[in-house]
């Protein structure tokens, strides 16, 4: 355990003079990892000033795209070189199993490498003339961008925001979750070592109520990219409306995972289990509502339950571990409460629904993979995002019944469809109100494809080539001929 709190990064300098610190507690053991300096409103002001100066300086403003791309590619190289440090840091912060942390570290490097390519090749546009002039569309950075990231997968979430925002020419103030500040601080160090000008990336660990609120409200922050809960997203949107500020909000989900009777049932059951229990269900796209056509309902439930029982919780750095703790003790308590509510509403716990009976795990925030049936789509466990390893199973009779139930949700982030009928697959995919639909697969993700949600799951689309345009403003330029 470090004896000194970990500092903030402002203007290329590591700042340790804060009035408050935040403890990082390892959810696998309950032990203190370290303390981190907590940013206050004055640190937000200092970071915004540093970012404004840096983004206005010729060294960044006039940097040619291929040189900016070179810095992004170097950051990617450094993340790969330091992948084990990034992986260990995330594992200690949120308890995600080490194998998944390692995969996410390499994915984060891939994100920076992808946007290095986009940065170097994305150009302006010449528009069709409608008179004696030449019309062009060029794209300008907003200036100072705030990126606010969640605790479930900071390695990938921070890369998916910071890399395109930098490629677009902005300066970024990154505020990680107070639960998981380590990856962001390591990213800030890698960016400096890669030659990113001081002040172009600032890292402010702190609470949402203090640092996050001050950052969103700051008049010189012209764009906010936020991933997190829908309630927090609404508060950010309200502040943005007062400022007339653009935002990208990737929020909650209650994704339907659908199995028709003609599907490859074994493959579907395996994907259903992975889709909810991977990462202990702490994923915005977790398939937390399972809809199974009645003819194969019992068979699918039995197969998923078998896979759930086989997932034995373990310390996240145990060799072969696939199922670790929840991210915090408070979150484990919330998941427990939601399962008890489901029981009170008439739900039947097929498997799980308790903490593991293992003395070696007694000090950690563990909870068993849980499958519940016997509820209808109106139950709280089927309406509210639990964000844990809890799957609610519901039968359906036909396609119209399925689509009605699947879309009867405030959320619309993702969905999965399993069927051997390609016509049905296409039909249902188009009818589902979701930003991402997987057909005969689940949780396949590509940095090259846009990502975002319908309805209360957010606004805007991250990733893909449009992920750079998200952080830019279009400008029309006319040349008289």
Image (cartoon, grey):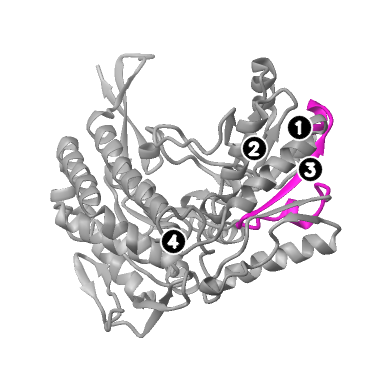
Q: CA distance from mark 2 to mark 1?
A: 20 Å
- Which is nearer the N-term, disc 1 or disc 4? 4
| Mark 4: few/some/many CA within 10 Å (<14, 14-19, 20+) | many
Q: CA distance from mark 1 to mark 3?
A: 13 Å
Q: Is residue 125 left or right of residue 302?
A: left
The structure residue drawn at horizontal position 30% and vertical position 36%, both measured from the top left corner, is 114
Residue 223 in sight from this viewpoint: no
Residue 269 has which mark? 2
Residue denoted by label 3: 394
Q: Is residue 312 left or right of residue 473?
A: right
The structure residue drawn at horizontal position 69% and vertical position 59%, both measured from the top left corner, is 352
- Which is nearer the N-term, disc 2 or disc 1? 2
Q: CA distance from mark 2 to mark 4?
A: 24 Å
The structure residue drawn at horizontal position 51% and vertical position 65%, both measured from the top left corner, is 327
- Given this view, does label 4 or label 3 mark the residue nearer the observer? 4
Q: Are marks 2 and 4 in contact (CB under 8 Å)?
A: no
Q: Which residues are magenta?
A: 375-403
Residue denoted by label 4: 316
Residue 332 in sight from this viewpoint: yes
* Residue 261, above or below 54: above
- Which is nearer the N-term, disc 2 or disc 4? 2
Q: CA distance from mark 3 to mark 2?
A: 14 Å
Q: Give 135 or 262, whichever is nearer the viewer.
A: 262
- Which is nearer the N-term, disc 1 or disc 3? 3
* Residue 210, above or below 49: below
Q: CA distance from mark 1 to mark 4?
A: 38 Å
Q: Secondary structure at mark 1?
A: helix
Q: Position of residue 444 (x, y in %)?
A: 49, 35
């Amino acid at each position: 355990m470090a004896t000194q709190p970990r500092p903030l990064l402002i203007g290329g300098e590591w700042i340790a003079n804060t009035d408050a610190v935040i403890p990082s507690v390892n959810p696998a053991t309950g032990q203190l990892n370290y303390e981190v300096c907590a940013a206050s409103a004055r640190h937000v002001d200092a970071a915004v000033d540093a970012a404004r100066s840096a983004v206005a300086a010729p060294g960044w403003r006039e940097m040619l795209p291929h040189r900016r791309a070179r810095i992004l590619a170097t950051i990617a190289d450094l993340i790969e070189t330091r992948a084990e440090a990034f992986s260990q840091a995330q594992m200690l912060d949120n308890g995600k199993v080490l194998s998944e942390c390692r995969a996410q570290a390499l994915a984060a490097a891939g994100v920076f490498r992808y946007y290095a390519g986009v940065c170097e090749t994305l150009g302006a546009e010449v528009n069709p003339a409608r008179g004696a002039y030449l019309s062009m569309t060029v794209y300008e950075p907003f200036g100072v961008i705030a990126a606010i990231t969640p605790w479930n997968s900071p390695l990938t979430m921070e890369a998916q925001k910071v890399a395109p925002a930098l490629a677009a020419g902005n300066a970024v103030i990154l505020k990680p979750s107070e639960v998981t500040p380590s990856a962001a601080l390591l990213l800030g160090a890698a960016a400096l070592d890669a030659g990113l000008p001081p002040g172009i990336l600032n890292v402010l660990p702190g609470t949402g109520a203090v640092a996050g609120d001050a950052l969103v409200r700051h008049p010189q922050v012209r764009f906010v990219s936020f991933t997190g809960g829908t309630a927090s997203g609404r508060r950010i949107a309200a502040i943005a409306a007062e400022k007339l500020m653009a935002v990208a909000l990737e929020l909650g989900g209650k994704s339907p995972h659908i199995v028709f009777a003609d599907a490859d049932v074994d493959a579907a059951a395996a994907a259903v289990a992975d889709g909810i229990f991977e990462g202990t269900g702490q994923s915005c796209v977790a398939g937390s509502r399972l809809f199974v056509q009645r003819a194969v309902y019992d068979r699918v439930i039995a197969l998923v339950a078998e896979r759930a029982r086989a997932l034995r919780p373990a310390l996240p750095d145990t060799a072969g571990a696939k199922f670790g703790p929840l991210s915090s003790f408070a979150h484990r308590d919330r998941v427990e409460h939601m399962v008890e509510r489901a029981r009170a509403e008439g739900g039947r716990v097929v498997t799980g629904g308790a903490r593991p009976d293992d003395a070696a795990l007694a000090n950690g925030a563990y909870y068993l993979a849980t499958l519940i049936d016997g509820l209808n789509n109106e139950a709280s466990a089927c309406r509210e995002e639990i964000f844990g390893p809890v799957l609610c199973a519901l039968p359906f009779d036909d396609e119209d019944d399925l689509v009605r139930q699947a879309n009867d949700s405030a959320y619309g982030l993702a969905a999965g469809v399993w069927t051997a009928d390609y016509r049905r697959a296409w039909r249902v995919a188009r009818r589902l109100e979701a930003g991402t639909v997987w057909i005969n697969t689940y949780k396949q993700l590509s940095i090259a494809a846009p990502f975002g949600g319908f309805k209360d799951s957010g606004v805007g689309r991250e990733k893909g080539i449009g992920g750079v345009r998200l952080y830019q403003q279009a400008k029309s330029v006319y040349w008289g001929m």
